[in-house]
Image: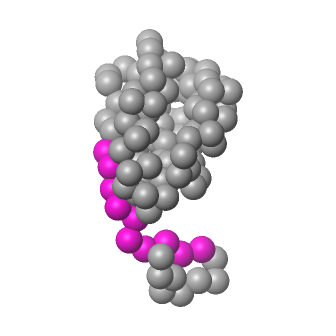
Amino acid sequence: MYARLVTGSISPDLIDQAIQIWMDNVLPSAQQQKGFRNVRLLVNREKGRIASMALWETEADFQATVEWNQDQISRFTGLFSVPPVVEGYELVVQADRGDLDAPL
């Protein structure tokens, strides 16, 4: 699997607005993308930090969503204090509660 991590800084008083945009737009759109596995939204309200991590089934699915991801980020125009950082990763280990050495 492949992960896209988007991190950024948002004024703490705009965090709830960003969460709402994410819930109303990004989440349902992500669920419609080919190869989508899951997505998480993390916030640190005190520091005004936000992070979204989405998992894609294959590298091809991950690459096919690059433009889609940019479109989603544009929904937050005016909320980020600086442009967000977008990074891609290969998921090499995943473990859930009760799992030990869970191979992919």
Give the colour scheme shown: one colour
Instruction: Residue 21: give x, y in percent of width and height.
Output: 61, 24
Q: Residue furthest bottom?
A: 100
Task: Pinpoint residue 42: horizontal percent, then vertical percent.
Answer: 54, 45
Q: Quadrant of residue 19?
A: top right
Q: Quadrant of residue 69?
A: top left
- What quarter of the picture does the N terminus occupy? bottom left
Viewer-closest of 36 and 18: 36
Let me know if residue 17 is in the magenta part. no
Residue 95 highlighted magenta (yes or no)? yes
Residue 7 visible: no
- Going 31% across and 45% down the picture, which residue do you hit? 87
In the picture shown, does residue 90 fall above or below 29? Answer: below
What is the number of callouts on the image? 0
Lateral position of residue 92 relative to residue 97, left or right: left
Q: Residue furthest top?
A: 78
Relative placement, left or right, of 78 versus 28 is left
Residue 32 higher or lower than 101, as above or below:
above
Question: 19 or 89, which is in the foreground?
Answer: 89
Q: Residue at x 38, y 51 (%)?
A: 60
Say above or below: 69 vs 79. Answer: below
- Most prominent secondary structure in the magenta stretch? loop
What residue appears at the point 44 percent right and 15 percent down from the top-left corner?
77
Q: Is residue 81 above or below residue 102?
A: above
For the point 63% across and 42% down, which residue is it? 31
Q: Is residue 37 visible?
A: yes
> Looking at the picture, how far across and down is residue 12, in whole percent?
52, 26
Q: Which residues are magenta?
A: 87-96
Coordinates of residue 93 in the picture (x, y in percent): 43, 74
